Image: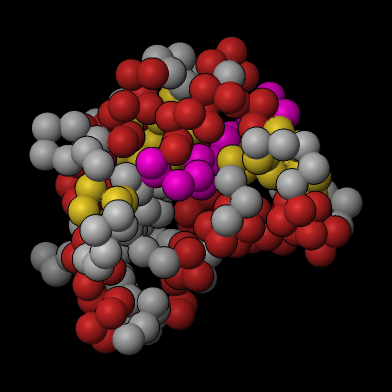
């Protein structure tokens, strides 16, 4: 499968590396075609890894991961291009965190809207699925870092798009992602992040996650 990864930060590089290790071809996108982090990542990950602009990565991928910072995701996706995203599964991993007033962060959007919904409205032809945004990037691709059973979530308006994302999550090691139904569930998923950040500081570890007890 060909995958586009938008963003060269820790999340983008972590997911890109995992996807390459699973045998996928991955193109990492950034604002410029000569991004130093993307070039370094490409060199480290062999012939299945490549890099280019946001538009290059979006055009390349059958599935596209939005790993940009939440505050600039909409602008980055505009650079990626609506035509390049049309009809494709767009996995939104980003969170609208605002650290401008220090810790803990606030959210730039919440309660009656979410970044996931804003992305779906801005790119109606994309098949947006919110996933993997409730944990640190290390755990995204290696659930075994936290012992025992714990949970990850998906939500989106397109059942087939969610099924494709669940398939990818299964390959990452997630056994039973919880489907929270339509994209409005992104509100709750994004509002989990200030709590996650507080827990990270209090417990002094990034290797933590949520378990839904039934």
User: In the visual, does 210 lie left or right of 130?
Assistant: left
Name the residue located 88 percent from the left edge and 51 percent from the top edge. 47
User: In the visual, does 103 lie left or right of 205?
Assistant: left
Quarter containing the N terminus: top right
* Location of residue 5 by image quarter: top right
Q: Is residue 63 magenta?
A: yes
Q: What is the total number of numbered labels drawn onto the structure image?
A: 0
User: In the visual, does 213 lie left or right of 208?
Assistant: left
Q: Report x, y in % for residue 154.
A: 33, 45
User: In the visual, does 84 lie left or right of 49?
Assistant: left
Please, which residue is most extreme toward the front here?
A: 101
Q: Is residue 39 above or below residue 198?
A: above
* Location of residue 208 by image quarter: bottom left
Name the residue located 58 percent from the left edge and 19 percent from the top edge. 81
Name the residue located 49 percent from the left edge and 56 percent from the top edge. 170
Q: Report x, y in % for residue 75.
A: 48, 29
Q: Is residue 188 above or below residue 57?
A: below
As rendered, which of 46 and 115 lies closer to the eye?
115
In the image, the segment drawn in magenta is 56-71
């Amino acid at each position: 499968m060909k995958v586009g990864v938008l963003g060269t930060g820790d999340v983008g590089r972590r997911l890109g590396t995992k996807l390459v290790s699973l045998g996928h071809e991955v193109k990492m996108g950034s604002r410029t075609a000569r991004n130093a982090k993307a070039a370094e990542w490409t060199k480290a990950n062999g012939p299945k890894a490549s890099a280019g602009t946001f538009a290059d990565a979006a055009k390349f991928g059958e599935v596209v991961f939005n790993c940009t910072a939440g505050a600039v995701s909409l602008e980055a996706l505009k650079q990626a291009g609506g035509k390049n995203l049309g009809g494709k599964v767009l996995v939104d991993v980003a969170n609208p965190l605002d650290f401008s007033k220090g810790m803990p962060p606030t959210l730039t959007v919440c309660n009656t809207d979410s970044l996931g919904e804003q992305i779906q409205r801005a790119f109606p032809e994309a098949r947006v699925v919110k996933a993997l945004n409730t944990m640190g990037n290390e755990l995204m691709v290696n659930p075994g870092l936290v012992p025992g059973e714990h949970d990850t979530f998906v939500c989106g308006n397109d059942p087939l798009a969610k099924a494709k994302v669940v398939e990818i999550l299964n390959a990452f090691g997630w056994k039973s992602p919880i489907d929270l139904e339509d994209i409005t569930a992104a509100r709750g998923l994004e509002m989990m992040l200030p709590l996650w950040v507080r827990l990270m500081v209090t417990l002094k570890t990034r290797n933590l996650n949520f378990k839904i007890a039934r």
